[in-house]
Image (spheres, rainbow, N blue to C red):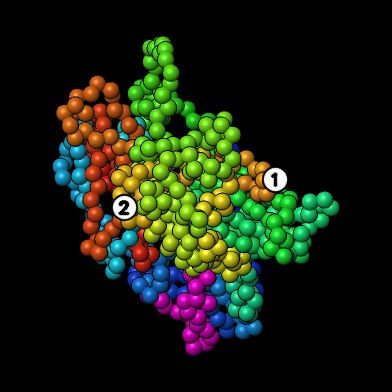
Amino acid sequence: MKYTAVCHTPDGNEKRFSLPEVSTTATVLKVTPNGNSIGISAAGVNRDCQVVIHERGNYLLSATFDSDRKELFLRKSDLPTGVVNAVLFDSEWNPLSERLFFVDNDDSYKTSLTSDKQLYTNRERVSLSVVLEGYDLPQGNYSVSVTDAKIVPSDSLSGISPSLLLTSELRGYVEAPGYYFDRANSNRLEALDALLLTQGWRRYDVPAIVRGNYAQPSYEVEIGQEVTGVIRSKWRNAPEAGAMVNVLVPKYRYGGLFEADSAGVFRCNGFDFPENTTLLLQAFNRKGERIYPNFEINTADVRPNAPFRLPESFSSGMDAEAQPHWKDFVDQQQIRYQYNGMAVTLDEVIIKGLKVRPPEDYYEVIASRSFDYKEMEKEGVTSVEEVLRNIAGLQISHDGYLRYRGFPTALFVDGVLQNAEAVSNKDFYTYMNQKKVEQPGSAPKVNTATLSSGHSSAALGLGSSYDSQLDIIERISFDIIRRIDFIRGSDAVMFGPQATGGAIMITTKRGNEVESSDSRGYQAVTPLGYQQKAEFYSPKYDTEAARSTTIPDLRPTLYWNPCVPVGEDGKSEVTFYTSDSGDTVYDVRIEGVTNCGNIISTVATLRVR
């Protein structure tokens, strides 16, 4: 038979498309869902063939079709949830047909959400209890978002289940993927099967895999930051073959040596620091002698250009008048902009007098002496040792250690204790997590990272090359120092017994304040780092003064937490306060993954009068 697709355009025109003619020599796979099982069979000319079934490249099973076996039945419970791929081969492993089908085994998983009240008023505390039921291992993490449905319409067309189980497995754009997971749609399974029949999956070359031809990844797995480039000689500008690039991060007591190849190309990686962390690059020849740092840094690797693009589903011609939710959002935007901390118009105030600079951090607050880099430049100071010798009572011993009135003085660089301990590549991050001084305003700890195959292996041990505190100070370039604080022993008890004579706190400059200086023998690089932790602002009306304030609260997003931990009992609590937008409904969306890979997903509503 011949088939024709008849399509009607929005303006009423009809278009007809002739589908490919039926082949009398083809062999295809047939997948027939039947309750709790799935039937797989071959139809066409070739009856002696074999099928291989896999999911995301993970082999599940294989079987042979012949005169004795014409159909294969599989229990859904034996298959993983998601898109499953079946490929039909002839006796010589030539591909004949490919078929995708979807398996849904998440009926036993349930995420229940209960609130402490059925109806809430403005600026009232809301307490939500979340319980994971039916999971073998409920431990994990999930995100929670609470939005005002009167301002922001609920997005039911996307979510973690459609993203992980469907759209990530298909090529091309899938319109409204959440439709296939909404159990309110009676025809969702038939529509999903039609989608898999028309939107092919070609991520894995299964015919090549069964023959033993495995494709290798084109790029290595990124585990942190990386700085690459070429190092050249000073005068001839020729590649420095075998030169050593020394990477120093005094802020986190990190040092690593990376060898350049025969073309002078070097790769420095295997570390992971927060954003605005400056790396100092120094160059040494094969003899270990310092050489002119003629670096050519690949700036695209340091700060890649990632232009922002709107998702395909976004319509640039949206009519705000035709969208009541968006109209409410626009009408209230000016009020939110004025009162929610975005912009506040103040009357003119004229202040006469000297401006008093507030302390930058906790160290400067308790310090008895502070030296700012601008003041040191103005006074012509050229070294940290020169600053320390101007502190009355502080002495530098002949072996290079600091003592204040006879008691030992600790040395910190950006809150990290500096000493002469050796730090290996294996325990560098463990050292960082143990030695960090936790107090208000301090930088976060460095994330643990492991070098993967193919990455450079840094020769660590910055501490092992130090003989004393003075030696550590001399290794820190004076150009990257922002401030030097001295804290007396009575105010430095929090730093432990090593600070009975006080503490010297050296604070380095921020990334945008450091300038490379070839004449001083180093080059400064500030690669992109991981974003430091920031908490979503959610006001608390826990006092009478907070509840009685006249500033309107018209937040479209009431609460957002990207990582709510789940304990062994599968229970967790979420609390927040309602806004001033009365007579509305809050949409609560919970999505995440358990430690064993099960998806957490639920949507609920809260009523506010």
Q: Nearer the viewer, residue 111 or 198?
A: 111
Percent coordinates x, y for residue 327 in the rendering: 39, 26
Percent coordinates x, y for residue 469 in the rendering: 49, 55
| Structural crowding at the residue carrying mark 2, measured as other residues with C-alpha within 10 Å and reported as few (<14), some (14–19) or many (≥20) | some
Would you say residue 497 is visible in this rendering? yes
Q: Nearer the viewer, residue 351 or 543?
A: 351
* Label total for image: 2
Q: Nearer the viewer, residue 373 or 208?
A: 373
Question: Split into 4 quadrants, where in the image is the N terminus?
Answer: bottom right
Mark 1 — residue? 518
For the point 20% across and 41% down, which residue is it? 126
For residue 548, what is the image quadrant?
A: top left
Would you say residue 200 is visible in this rendering? no
What number is the disc on residue 552?
none
For the point 55% across and 81% down, which residue is it? 50
Does 11 sit left or right of 501 as displayed? right
Check the image and report above or below for 370 versus 256: above
Query: Mostly what secondary structure, the magenta segment?
Result: strand
- Tell me the kind of residue under disc 1: Asp
Check the image and report above or below for 167 versus 345: below
Give the extent of the magenta segment. Answer: 52-75
Q: Is residue 58 magenta?
A: yes
Mark 2 — residue? 564
Sequence order check: which comes first, mark 1 or mark 2? Answer: 1
| Structural crowding at the residue carrying mark 1, measured as other residues with C-alpha within 10 Å and reported as few (<14), some (14–19) or many (≥20) | some
Q: Nearer the viewer, mark 1 or mark 2?
A: 1
